[in-house]
Structure formats: C-alpha cells, structure tokens
Image (cartoon, rainbow, N blue to C red):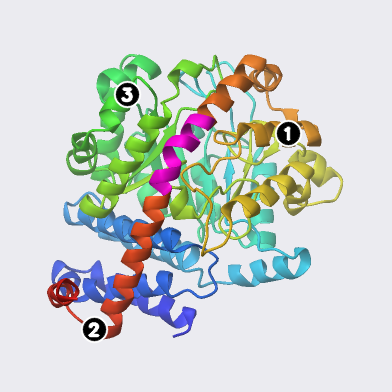
Amino acid sequence: MKAIDLNNQISALISNLVKSKVSRNLLEPQLKKYMKQKILDDKESKASIVAKQYQFLALWSMYKSFVRNMDKGNISSKVTKKIIKSFLNSVLLRKDVSNESRQAFQSKYGMLPPTFLTISPTKKCNLKCIGCYAASSPSTETTLNWTLLNRIIEDAYSNMGMRFFVISGGEPLLYKSENRTILDLAERWSDCFFLMYTNGTLINENIASRMADLGNITPAISIEGYDSETEERRGKGVYQRIIKAKDNLISNGVPFGLSVTATKKNISLLLNESFYDFYFNGFGATYMWVFQYMPIGRDFSEDLMISSRDRLQLHKIQDRILSGKEYFIADFWNSAPMSNGCISCGRAGGGYIYINWDGNIMPCVFVPYYHDNINTLYNAGKSLSDALFTPLFVKGRAWQKEYIGTKDNPGNLLRPCFYRDHYKTFYEIANQTQVLPENEDAQTALNSKEYYEFMLKFDKELEELSSPVWDNLKKSHKTKMQMSDVKYDTGLTDDDFTVRKLKQ
C-alpha cells in the first residue's frame, strides 16, 4: 500500500472516530492496525526496531490522550476539527506541498531538511525562575522584530517544507512587535501547527478564546510538581494562576499540555505514577514534556541535575505509563529511542534548529553555542538553510550518524546527547570549530575544568548503568516485533495469538 493511500485512510478514520464513541469502538482496532502498519512496515525508514516500536506507542498514546480529553468535554468538537486539519494533515501525515519543498531541498543539498524549527522570539518574561536556561527576566527587552520573525517562518516554510514550529522564550505571550503577537503569527500561518511553551500566567479568557478560534496552537504550561514545588522555583501565587489558565483553556475547548523540568528536588514526584494520574486525569492535560535539568543558564547548578540512576528509573516509569496507561509523555533525553537518537544540529528528516531572540542559530535549545546569526545570513543574501552547513552543525550530524549506527545495530539511545551524555565529544567539536557562546554562563562552562570533569563523570556513570538496560531493551523490542509480525500475518485475535504462542 502506498504511503499516501495509507495517510488518506488514517485521516479519514480519525475524522470518523472523533464524531462519536460508537464510531470509535468500531474503528479504533482498524486505526491501530493502520498506525502500526505505517510505522513498522516502513521500508524506507532508517529507524531501528526499537525506535519504530516507540514511535507507534507515542502516536497511539497521543491519540488516546486526545480522545480521552475530548470525551470529558475538555476539547471542543470545533477545535478538534481544526486540529485534524492543521496538525494531522499538514504536519503528521504531510499531505500538502511541503513534501515538494523537502524533495527540492534534498536534490540541492544531498540531505533531507530538518522537520521543525524552535524559535524564541523574545527573551522577556514576567517571571524570574531559578536556573532558567534562557536567563529570562522582566527587565530584558531583547526581541526579534515581526518582519524578521515572519521572514524566518516563510524561509523554513518554503525552503524546508516545515509546517511545525515550536515557540519558546522567554514568555511567548509577552511578545509584541509592530503591533503583532504570537497569536497573530499562528493566524498568519494557518496551515501550520504551533506548540508554545509558556508559564501560563497570561492565559486569560480572551487569549484562550482566540486559541480556540485559531485551532493551530497548543500551549505547554511549565510546572515543577504540585503547588509548592512550582512556586519554590517560579514564585508565590504562580500555581493558582496556572490553574486559572487551564480552566480558561478547558472552558474554550483548547487542548493543552505540561512542561516539567526534572531536578533532584522533584524527582521523587516524577517517579510516582500518581503524579501523572493527577495531571492527565484530574487536571486535564493532553500531553507532557519532561526536560531533565541542564547545568546551563542563569546561576546553573550541577547539584540540581538528577543522577544517572534516577534518569534510568525515570525512563522505566515513562515506559510503563506510555504503554500501560496510554498517557502521551515525551522526555527530551529518555525518549531518544522514539526519535532514533539526537535531533539537534538540523538532523535530516526528524531534526530541528533553534533560533533565539538575538537571531543566533544554535544546534539545540540546550546547547548555547553558535556560528551563524540569521540577520547576518539575510544581509549576505543567504537563507536559513545555509546555517545547516557550518562546522558545528556538520560535525554534530556526523557524530549523530556514527553514533546512532544502523537500524540493525543501533547505538545506545539511552545516552543520545552529544552535549549532556558525551561531553568530551562536544567539547572537542566546540574547540575545533571555534564556537561562539550565547552568554557568559556558556563561556564559563566551556572554560571550566571543574565543569568538564563533572560532565565526564556523569557521562561515565550513565554509560555503565545504561548499557545493560539498552541491550535488554533491544532484545525485548526485537521479540515484540517478531511476535507482532506473526500476529498480523496470521490474522489471529489477541486471545488466540496468546494461546498459540504459549503452545509453541
């Protein structure tokens, strides 16, 4: 079956599924089979068996998390229809001309373009959170002007076929230039989908209502745990404002998610399933992103980093929740098996680029070093595509390719990051390519012997602890894959299949 035909069928199925629970009961098994078929039987994919299994689990849990909130009345039918059009067709299934742009890019540069762009249009924020990676504060005014911001989106849209954009900060809802806001950006690019990281404190009734009308933007609200943990880092009264924000979103039928930074202070909460039950069931979240604290940014602290052992425990519980409870959780590091490794440096087909409020183009939000600035490129008559071929990006992708390995023998994807998990590699690349630090903290980290030794110690511990876990994971998923193939080849029901395998 051709990919486009399968995409059309999946799109039609989901459109029918959202109409009623009756339709869903009848068609969900078929949808699940199609999703699995699309991912596991993709002969062109370079992803390993492990990656394909995780990709299926992620896609299915994303769907289940969405319809769960739709059935509760947290997501309106109006917004649902718009999301199907903007996210499913334009982003997930890529049914539009974006594929033509991507193919043209490949013909010109010999590689597929990255899939999405993360951009922080402003450094300004109404909070001053401890350890903020962006060192944002209410006092800064550093902002990309509207004309430039719109040009960047146009560049990525036309030359790379991008239809998915992540907006970070600072606080995106404080962005205003030429009398335009982030919501105006989403309206201007109505056939794209926007994920916006926000502290949530500015999501009033009017903003939530506008998001519902747009239907192509979802906010991921930052929390640290429950009320006390969140307010310890973000300030007194913030949690109550977050509750008000989620109430506004739910009353307008807008799906939202949560963004959690895992630190030594809250890791005990994140290792407890009740934490996820609370936010996915009682609170109304549709998805959750977990970002393990990185020792960069304002007053970075090595003491806040979770240990290698805690990181693997976190992966274990995330696995259990993803497959068992079908909550959509993605961890920027632990979910690397899902993405088939590191996605920084503009990795071909699935990777991303990051641009900050100064226009600096970096390989990752959490790697504060760069070569190019978007203003410099545009003034020289170049495009965003040219940034992909600076030494830092090229060497980063070369390392990714070597480390990820082949689909039959992938590298250890539980330690995917060339900065956090392979700091010696990053340090050597950074010095070879003479990177520019984004800020003083980045310069300090690069010059610090103590920081270097700390990161190498962490890397060594993670390698020792994660290697046997990864080996077992590969074996487990290979077995699952083989069993899955037998099941679909024979057309057995779940119960019949189980009995047959037991007899064998």
What is the three-letter code of the residue carrying label 1? Answer: Glu
| Element type where label 1 sits in the image | helix
Query: Magenta segment: does it hold 467?
Result: yes
Q: How far apart are marks 2 and 3 (CA)?
A: 46 Å
State the residue in front, 494 or 443: 494
Q: Which of marks 2 and 3 is nearer the N terminus?
A: 3
Quadrant housing the C terminus: bottom left
Name the residue: 59% across, 60% down.
349
Mark 2 vs 3: CB contact within 8 A: no
State the residue in front, 16 or 370: 370
Query: Magenta segment: does it hold 109?
Result: no
Q: How crowded is mark 3: few (under 14 residues within 10 Å), some or many (20 or more)?
A: some
Give the residue at the far front of this rendering: 504
Residue 66, horizontal then vertical, whole percent: 28, 55
| Element type where label 3 sits in the image | loop
For residue 430, above or below residue 53: above
Does any portion of residue 420 appear in the rendered image? yes
Q: Give the range drawn in magenta.
A: 460-470
Q: How crowded is mark 1: few (under 14 residues within 10 Å), some or many (20 or more)?
A: few
Q: Residue beneath label 2, please? A: 491
Name the residue: 34% across, 71% down.
482
Residue 362, horizontal then vertical, whole percent: 67, 39
Q: Earlier in the sequence, mark 1 or mark 2?
A: 1
For residue 316, above or below residue 2: above
| Element type where label 2 sits in the image | loop
What is the three-letter code of the residue carrying label 2? Answer: Gly
Does any portion of residue 135 appear in the rendered image? no
What is the three-letter code of the residue carrying label 3? Answer: Asn
Q: Residue beneath label 3, please? A: 266
Q: How far apart are marks 1 and 2 (CA)?
A: 53 Å
Q: In this view, does 408 lie to the left or right of 388?
A: left
